[in-house]
Image (tube, helix red, strand yellow):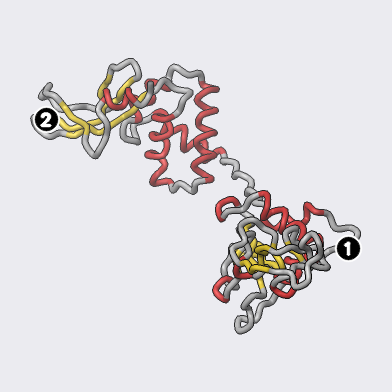
Amino acid sequence: MSNFKYGVAEFDAFARSCPYFDPASPVNNGYGCNHKEQEETDDYEPVDPDEEGEDLDGYKAGTYGKCHCWSCPIGMEAEEEDISKPEVFWDGLTPDPEAMENEYLMVPMHESVGANAETIDAWTRYQAYLNRYNKTWMPKEALKPFIVVQEPAQEPTDQDIAAVMFHLGYEVAAGATAAARNLRKKTGDEVLSMAKDYASEAKNAEIQPANLADFVTDKINHDKRLDPMRIVACECEKCGTVFGVCYHADGSYEYANAPCECEADFRPINGEPSISEWLETLF
């Protein structure tokens, strides 16, 4: 799996391949930049302009951008601390930490760090310049270091599925009894299909056996293949006994386990919503 987010280019080669580079610029010793976001500029006044106000190279009086690694609008100058960063692709370059100034440009190549069509095009042009004598080189090769390859999902074993099936139908997880009643409306094949899905997610999320019951209960409560329901912990307002209450989408509720005998009002605890608050999230 690739973790690279920046590509590092040798700046002089990058400049020569950059579409904004102006090698005949009248400023900065021929290192000009035509990018509209270039902030480093110099004013120029032709010494002996022709009738149209141009010098021998066709430049008129005006303000022209200067090409510098540290002011490049497409990337940022690489520094010593960037050498060891795992997200930085150095492409075989071996920088000298003592002589990096104005030598290397970091080009964003992942959307999380600001990559866009312009930065990707600039990096591809740079790679094409480096490989200009390689007749077999293809532009898509420039992007290979930055393509994230997803690891294949792990398939659950029969033992994994059996463990989930156990939690789907028996009183081992808080509230599983009420959830199981909802599940009994499904056919055996449907329940098995859900068990396989849950087992696969648990395996790939590395859920430990001790936490599997809670994981399965949470999956039941949010599975759209079941009627919307939610099991919350509630407390009797009279005696303080804590028990589970199962909310249903039709506004009804049932006890997930045995409540106290007070028959008094109860309230949600631990930040759980009331049934009216929960229903508002559904519709």
Compared across the picture, whether 178 is left or right of 4 comes to left
Residue 237 is tagged as 2
Residue 43 quadrant: bottom right
Residue that numbered label 1 is attached to:
134
Residue 57: x and y in percent read 82, 66
Q: Secondary structure at mark 2?
A: loop
Say which label, 1 or 2, has the lower sequence index.
1
Identify residue type, mark 1.
Asn
| Residue 147 visible somewhere in the drawing | yes
| Front residue of this view, candidates 227 and 44 | 44
* Residue found at x 69% / y 77%: 94
Give the answer, above or below, for where 50 lies relative to 121.
below
Residue 1 is tagged as none
* Residue found at x 60% / y 41%: 155
| Front residue of this view, candidates 143 and 57 | 57
* Residue found at x 42% / y 30%: 222
Residue 64: x and y in percent read 67, 64
Residue 262: x and y in percent read 10, 24
| Residue 4 visible somewhere in the drawing | no
- Outermost front residue: 51
Give the answer, above or below, for where 114 lies relative to 263.
below
